[in-house]
Image: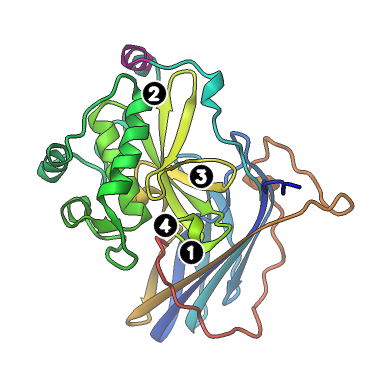
Amino acid sequence: MSTARPNRFSIQHDSYFDYEEPVSNKVMLVRLQPRNDRGQHLRSFSLTIDPVANPVPCKDSFGNICHTISIFSKSMQTHVKSTSLVNSAEGIDFTTKPIVSWDELRNQIKKANLWHYLAPSKLVYPGLALDNFIKKHDLKQKSSPIETLRALSSELYNHLDYEPGSTSVQSPLEFFLVEGKGVCQDYTHAMLALARNWGIPCRYVSGYLYIASPSDSQSREVASHAWPEFWLPELGWYGLDPTNDSVVDHRFIRVAHGRDYSDVAPTRGVVFGGGKMSVSVKVIMKPSVPEAQNDVALSRDQNFMQVALPSWQNLTGKSTPPDQGESNQ
Protein backbone atom coordinates (compact mmCIF):
# COMPACT_ATOMS: atom_id res chain seq x y z
CA MET A 1 0.00 0.00 0.00
CA SER A 2 1.48 3.35 -1.04
CA THR A 3 1.51 6.39 1.21
CA ALA A 4 -0.13 9.55 -0.13
CA ARG A 5 2.32 12.38 -0.54
CA PRO A 6 1.70 15.36 1.76
CA ASN A 7 0.29 18.59 0.37
CA ARG A 8 -0.50 20.40 3.62
CA PHE A 9 2.24 21.54 5.97
CA SER A 10 2.55 23.18 9.35
CA ILE A 11 5.58 25.46 9.67
CA GLN A 12 7.10 27.06 12.75
CA HIS A 13 9.85 29.62 12.15
CA ASP A 14 11.74 30.97 15.18
CA SER A 15 14.29 33.79 14.89
CA TYR A 16 16.33 34.81 17.94
CA PHE A 17 18.31 38.07 18.02
CA ASP A 18 20.70 38.22 21.00
CA TYR A 19 22.59 41.38 22.01
CA GLU A 20 25.61 41.90 24.24
CA GLU A 21 24.07 45.13 25.58
CA PRO A 22 20.44 46.21 26.14
CA VAL A 23 18.50 47.43 23.10
CA SER A 24 16.32 50.46 23.87
CA ASN A 25 14.33 50.62 20.60
CA LYS A 26 13.98 48.38 17.58
CA VAL A 27 12.07 48.59 14.29
CA MET A 28 11.83 45.51 12.07
CA LEU A 29 10.30 44.50 8.74
CA VAL A 30 9.62 40.76 8.44
CA ARG A 31 8.54 38.63 5.47
CA LEU A 32 7.41 35.39 7.03
CA GLN A 33 3.82 34.97 5.83
CA PRO A 34 3.51 32.40 3.00
CA ARG A 35 1.90 33.60 -0.20
CA ASN A 36 -1.69 32.71 -1.03
CA ASP A 37 -1.74 32.39 -4.82
CA ARG A 38 -1.00 30.18 -7.85
CA GLY A 39 -2.48 27.08 -6.24
CA GLN A 40 -0.82 27.58 -2.87
CA HIS A 41 -3.46 28.08 -0.15
CA LEU A 42 -2.59 29.75 3.15
CA ARG A 43 -4.93 28.27 5.77
CA SER A 44 -3.70 30.21 8.81
CA PHE A 45 -0.82 32.40 9.95
CA SER A 46 0.24 33.98 13.24
CA LEU A 47 3.12 36.03 14.65
CA THR A 48 4.29 36.17 18.25
CA ILE A 49 6.88 38.72 19.37
CA ASP A 50 8.93 38.92 22.56
CA PRO A 51 9.21 41.67 23.86
CA VAL A 52 5.55 42.39 23.24
CA ALA A 53 4.76 44.27 19.99
CA ASN A 54 1.90 44.73 17.55
CA PRO A 55 2.94 43.76 13.99
CA VAL A 56 1.33 45.88 11.28
CA PRO A 57 0.65 44.08 7.96
CA CYS A 58 1.51 45.65 4.61
CA LYS A 59 2.51 44.72 1.06
CA ASP A 60 5.79 45.46 -0.66
CA SER A 61 6.23 46.36 -4.34
CA PHE A 62 6.38 42.67 -5.34
CA GLY A 63 3.11 41.81 -3.60
CA ASN A 64 4.76 40.01 -0.69
CA ILE A 65 3.04 40.24 2.69
CA CYS A 66 5.23 42.02 5.25
CA HIS A 67 4.79 43.01 8.90
CA THR A 68 6.42 46.00 10.57
CA ILE A 69 7.34 45.54 14.22
CA SER A 70 8.19 48.40 16.60
CA ILE A 71 9.63 47.53 20.03
CA PHE A 72 10.08 50.31 22.59
CA SER A 73 11.16 48.36 25.68
CA LYS A 74 14.68 47.46 26.76
CA SER A 75 15.78 43.88 26.19
CA MET A 76 18.79 41.66 25.55
CA GLN A 77 16.95 39.39 23.12
CA THR A 78 14.19 39.61 20.50
CA HIS A 79 12.28 36.47 19.54
CA VAL A 80 10.11 36.46 16.41
CA LYS A 81 7.96 33.34 16.00
CA SER A 82 5.72 32.65 13.02
CA THR A 83 3.41 29.67 12.58
CA SER A 84 1.73 28.77 9.30
CA LEU A 85 -0.59 26.13 7.92
CA VAL A 86 -0.35 25.90 4.14
CA ASN A 87 -1.68 23.75 1.31
CA SER A 88 1.11 23.45 -1.25
CA ALA A 89 0.77 23.75 -5.03
CA GLU A 90 1.49 21.00 -7.53
CA GLY A 91 4.40 21.29 -9.96
CA ILE A 92 3.94 21.84 -13.70
CA ASP A 93 3.19 18.73 -15.77
CA PHE A 94 5.24 19.23 -18.93
CA THR A 95 3.62 16.31 -20.73
CA THR A 96 0.52 18.47 -21.18
CA LYS A 97 2.33 21.69 -22.11
CA PRO A 98 3.72 22.79 -25.51
CA ILE A 99 7.46 23.36 -25.91
CA VAL A 100 8.12 27.10 -26.04
CA SER A 101 10.67 28.31 -28.60
CA TRP A 102 13.24 31.07 -28.15
CA ASP A 103 11.47 33.20 -30.75
CA GLU A 104 8.14 32.86 -28.95
CA LEU A 105 9.77 33.80 -25.65
CA ARG A 106 11.34 36.92 -27.16
CA ASN A 107 8.04 37.96 -28.76
CA GLN A 108 6.03 37.45 -25.58
CA ILE A 109 8.55 39.34 -23.43
CA LYS A 110 7.89 42.44 -25.50
CA LYS A 111 4.22 42.31 -24.46
CA ALA A 112 4.83 41.59 -20.76
CA ASN A 113 6.05 44.02 -18.12
CA LEU A 114 9.01 41.92 -17.01
CA TRP A 115 11.91 44.31 -17.45
CA HIS A 116 12.82 44.26 -13.73
CA TYR A 117 13.28 40.46 -13.93
CA LEU A 118 15.68 40.81 -16.87
CA ALA A 119 17.81 43.73 -15.70
CA PRO A 120 20.79 43.45 -13.32
CA SER A 121 19.94 43.79 -9.63
CA LYS A 122 21.90 44.37 -6.43
CA LEU A 123 23.04 40.74 -6.06
CA VAL A 124 22.50 39.38 -9.60
CA TYR A 125 24.54 40.97 -12.38
CA PRO A 126 26.85 40.25 -15.35
CA GLY A 127 30.62 40.41 -15.04
CA LEU A 128 33.96 38.79 -15.74
CA ALA A 129 33.39 36.01 -13.19
CA LEU A 130 30.12 35.05 -14.89
CA ASP A 131 31.72 35.13 -18.36
CA ASN A 132 34.61 32.95 -17.15
CA PHE A 133 32.21 30.49 -15.52
CA ILE A 134 30.28 30.14 -18.79
CA LYS A 135 33.48 29.50 -20.75
CA LYS A 136 34.97 27.13 -18.16
CA HIS A 137 31.93 24.85 -18.16
CA ASP A 138 31.00 25.41 -21.83
CA LEU A 139 27.48 26.53 -20.97
CA LYS A 140 25.33 27.08 -24.07
CA GLN A 141 21.71 27.65 -24.95
CA LYS A 142 19.85 24.48 -25.91
CA SER A 143 17.12 24.15 -28.53
CA SER A 144 14.44 25.59 -26.21
CA PRO A 145 14.37 27.74 -23.05
CA ILE A 146 13.01 24.91 -20.90
CA GLU A 147 15.69 22.48 -22.07
CA THR A 148 18.30 25.16 -21.38
CA LEU A 149 17.05 25.73 -17.84
CA ARG A 150 16.86 22.04 -16.98
CA ALA A 151 20.40 21.51 -18.25
CA LEU A 152 21.64 24.60 -16.40
CA SER A 153 20.19 23.37 -13.12
CA SER A 154 22.10 20.10 -13.52
CA GLU A 155 25.32 21.90 -14.46
CA LEU A 156 25.24 24.06 -11.33
CA TYR A 157 24.43 21.04 -9.17
CA ASN A 158 27.31 19.02 -10.65
CA HIS A 159 30.01 21.70 -10.81
CA LEU A 160 29.45 23.59 -7.54
CA ASP A 161 29.66 22.35 -3.96
CA TYR A 162 26.99 22.80 -1.34
CA GLU A 163 28.90 23.83 1.79
CA PRO A 164 27.01 25.33 4.77
CA GLY A 165 28.79 28.29 6.35
CA SER A 166 30.99 28.98 3.32
CA THR A 167 29.08 32.16 2.41
CA SER A 168 26.81 34.72 4.05
CA VAL A 169 24.02 37.00 2.82
CA GLN A 170 26.71 39.62 2.10
CA SER A 171 28.84 37.30 -0.08
CA PRO A 172 29.05 38.52 -3.70
CA LEU A 173 28.13 36.38 -6.69
CA GLU A 174 31.80 36.32 -7.78
CA PHE A 175 32.85 34.38 -4.65
CA PHE A 176 30.48 31.52 -5.40
CA LEU A 177 31.39 31.34 -9.08
CA VAL A 178 35.14 31.46 -8.43
CA GLU A 179 35.40 29.42 -5.21
CA GLY A 180 32.71 26.99 -6.30
CA LYS A 181 31.00 26.55 -2.93
CA GLY A 182 28.00 28.07 -1.22
CA VAL A 183 24.40 27.53 -0.10
CA CYS A 184 20.94 27.71 -1.65
CA GLN A 185 20.87 31.49 -2.07
CA ASP A 186 24.17 31.31 -3.99
CA TYR A 187 22.90 28.60 -6.35
CA THR A 188 19.80 30.73 -6.89
CA HIS A 189 21.72 33.95 -7.63
CA ALA A 190 24.05 32.12 -10.04
CA MET A 191 21.16 30.58 -11.98
CA LEU A 192 19.34 33.92 -12.13
CA ALA A 193 22.45 35.64 -13.51
CA LEU A 194 22.89 32.98 -16.21
CA ALA A 195 19.20 32.96 -17.20
CA ARG A 196 19.04 36.76 -17.46
CA ASN A 197 22.21 36.62 -19.54
CA TRP A 198 20.22 34.50 -22.03
CA GLY A 199 17.15 36.73 -21.95
CA ILE A 200 14.90 34.60 -19.71
CA PRO A 201 12.87 36.62 -17.13
CA CYS A 202 13.49 35.17 -13.67
CA ARG A 203 13.11 35.95 -9.98
CA TYR A 204 14.34 34.88 -6.56
CA VAL A 205 11.94 32.94 -4.31
CA SER A 206 12.32 32.44 -0.56
CA GLY A 207 10.34 29.81 1.28
CA TYR A 208 10.47 26.35 2.75
CA LEU A 209 11.34 22.88 1.48
CA TYR A 210 9.93 19.77 3.11
CA ILE A 211 12.59 17.08 3.47
CA ALA A 212 11.25 13.62 4.28
CA SER A 213 14.64 12.18 5.25
CA PRO A 214 18.28 13.38 5.49
CA SER A 215 19.16 11.57 2.25
CA ASP A 216 16.50 13.33 0.20
CA SER A 217 18.21 16.69 -0.19
CA GLN A 218 21.52 18.50 -0.27
CA SER A 219 20.01 21.36 1.74
CA ARG A 220 19.02 19.15 4.67
CA GLU A 221 20.25 21.27 7.59
CA VAL A 222 17.21 23.53 7.70
CA ALA A 223 13.82 23.70 6.03
CA SER A 224 14.12 27.37 5.00
CA HIS A 225 15.16 27.50 1.37
CA ALA A 226 15.56 29.58 -1.80
CA TRP A 227 15.17 28.80 -5.49
CA PRO A 228 14.62 30.63 -8.82
CA GLU A 229 11.48 30.92 -10.91
CA PHE A 230 11.43 31.58 -14.66
CA TRP A 231 8.70 33.13 -16.77
CA LEU A 232 7.83 31.25 -19.95
CA PRO A 233 4.90 31.71 -22.37
CA GLU A 234 2.03 29.22 -21.85
CA LEU A 235 3.58 28.16 -18.51
CA GLY A 236 3.83 31.35 -16.49
CA TRP A 237 6.24 31.16 -13.55
CA TYR A 238 8.12 27.87 -13.42
CA GLY A 239 10.42 26.89 -10.53
CA LEU A 240 13.62 24.86 -10.48
CA ASP A 241 15.87 24.07 -7.52
CA PRO A 242 19.52 23.96 -8.65
CA THR A 243 20.69 23.27 -5.07
CA ASN A 244 19.09 19.83 -5.34
CA ASP A 245 18.69 19.63 -9.15
CA SER A 246 14.93 19.18 -8.95
CA VAL A 247 11.73 20.77 -10.16
CA VAL A 248 9.65 22.78 -7.69
CA ASP A 249 6.67 20.66 -6.65
CA HIS A 250 4.36 19.96 -3.68
CA ARG A 251 7.32 19.96 -1.23
CA PHE A 252 7.98 23.69 -1.69
CA ILE A 253 6.17 26.53 0.11
CA ARG A 254 6.61 30.05 -1.31
CA VAL A 255 6.91 33.01 1.09
CA ALA A 256 8.23 35.92 -0.99
CA HIS A 257 9.72 36.70 -4.41
CA GLY A 258 11.80 39.52 -5.84
CA ARG A 259 14.80 40.29 -8.02
CA ASP A 260 17.27 38.74 -5.54
CA TYR A 261 17.70 38.04 -1.83
CA SER A 262 17.84 41.73 -0.91
CA ASP A 263 14.17 42.07 -1.99
CA VAL A 264 12.91 39.15 0.13
CA ALA A 265 15.03 39.09 3.31
CA PRO A 266 12.89 37.42 6.03
CA THR A 267 13.99 39.91 8.69
CA ARG A 268 15.50 43.37 8.45
CA GLY A 269 15.63 46.22 10.92
CA VAL A 270 17.30 49.01 12.86
CA VAL A 271 18.24 48.87 16.55
CA PHE A 272 19.31 51.54 19.02
CA GLY A 273 22.03 50.19 21.29
CA GLY A 274 22.67 46.48 21.67
CA GLY A 275 26.33 46.30 20.67
CA LYS A 276 27.31 43.07 18.94
CA MET A 277 24.37 40.97 17.75
CA SER A 278 24.07 37.23 17.08
CA VAL A 279 21.21 35.61 15.18
CA SER A 280 19.93 32.05 15.36
CA VAL A 281 17.10 30.54 13.32
CA LYS A 282 15.11 27.36 13.74
CA VAL A 283 12.50 26.05 11.30
CA ILE A 284 10.24 23.05 11.87
CA MET A 285 8.16 21.90 8.90
CA LYS A 286 5.81 18.91 9.16
CA PRO A 287 3.03 17.36 7.07
CA SER A 288 -0.39 18.18 8.50
CA VAL A 289 -3.51 16.02 8.26
CA PRO A 290 -6.71 18.05 7.68
CA GLU A 291 -9.23 18.03 10.51
CA ALA A 292 -12.71 18.23 9.01
CA GLN A 293 -14.26 19.35 12.28
CA ASN A 294 -11.91 22.21 13.11
CA ASP A 295 -10.34 23.29 9.81
CA VAL A 296 -11.76 26.64 8.68
CA ALA A 297 -11.22 27.14 4.95
CA LEU A 298 -10.08 30.60 3.90
CA SER A 299 -10.87 32.14 0.53
CA ARG A 300 -8.33 31.46 -2.25
CA ASP A 301 -8.20 35.18 -3.03
CA GLN A 302 -7.43 35.89 0.62
CA ASN A 303 -5.26 38.94 1.22
CA PHE A 304 -3.20 39.92 4.21
CA MET A 305 -6.12 41.64 5.96
CA GLN A 306 -8.00 38.32 6.13
CA VAL A 307 -5.34 36.46 8.09
CA ALA A 308 -6.36 36.38 11.74
CA LEU A 309 -3.47 37.21 14.07
CA PRO A 310 -3.57 36.17 17.75
CA SER A 311 -3.38 38.46 20.73
CA TRP A 312 0.16 39.73 21.25
CA GLN A 313 1.70 38.50 24.45
CA ASN A 314 5.07 37.83 26.02
CA LEU A 315 6.49 34.36 25.62
CA THR A 316 7.28 32.31 28.70
CA GLY A 317 9.54 29.35 29.29
CA LYS A 318 12.06 30.15 26.56
CA SER A 319 14.77 27.58 26.03
CA THR A 320 18.34 28.26 24.99
CA PRO A 321 18.39 29.69 21.44
CA PRO A 322 19.12 26.94 18.89
CA ASP A 323 22.18 26.96 16.69
CA GLN A 324 21.59 28.74 13.41
CA GLY A 325 23.26 26.11 11.26
CA GLU A 326 23.06 26.76 7.51
CA SER A 327 20.37 29.31 6.91
CA ASN A 328 19.71 32.05 4.42
CA GLN A 329 17.69 33.93 7.05
Mark 1 or 3, nearer chain start? 3
Mark 3 or 2, nearer chain start? 3
Say if residue 210 shows up in the picture.
yes
Identify the residue under disc 2: 113
| Above or below for 233 versus 42 | above
Secondary structure beneath label 4: loop
Task: Specify the quadrant of the image occupied by residue 169.
Answer: bottom left
Residue 307 placement (x, y as % from top left) = 69, 50
Identify the residue under disc 4: 218
Mark 1 or 2, nearer chain start? 2
Give the main secondary structure, helix, strand or loop, of the magenta stretch.
helix
Crowdedness near tag 3: few (<14), some (14–19) or many (≥20) residues, C-alpha within 10 Å: many
Q: Please report the residue visible at 39 percent of the width from the left and 72 percent of the height from the top.
A: 271
Q: Give, as a single range, the part of the protein colored magenta.
A: 101-108
Crowdedness near tag 1: few (<14), some (14–19) or many (≥20) residues, C-alpha within 10 Å: many
Identify the residue under disc 1: 222
Q: Please report the residue visible at 57 percent of the width from the left and 53 percent of the height from the top.
A: 33
Mark-to-mark CA distance, 4 and 1: 10 Å
Q: Nearer the viewer, residue 240 or 296?
A: 240
Residue 29 placement (x, y as % from top left) = 47, 59
Residue 134 placement (x, y as % from top left) = 17, 38
Identified by mark 3, the residue type is Asn
Identified by mark 4, the residue type is Gln
Q: Please report the residue visible at 45 percent of the width from the left and 39 percent of the height from the top.
A: 62
133 horizontally vs 13: left or right: left
Identify the residue under disc 3: 64
Crowdedness near tag 4: few (<14), some (14–19) or many (≥20) residues, C-alpha within 10 Å: some
Mark-to-mark CA distance, 1 and 2: 35 Å
Q: Please report the residue visible at 30 percent of the width from the left and 63 percent of the height from the top.
A: 168
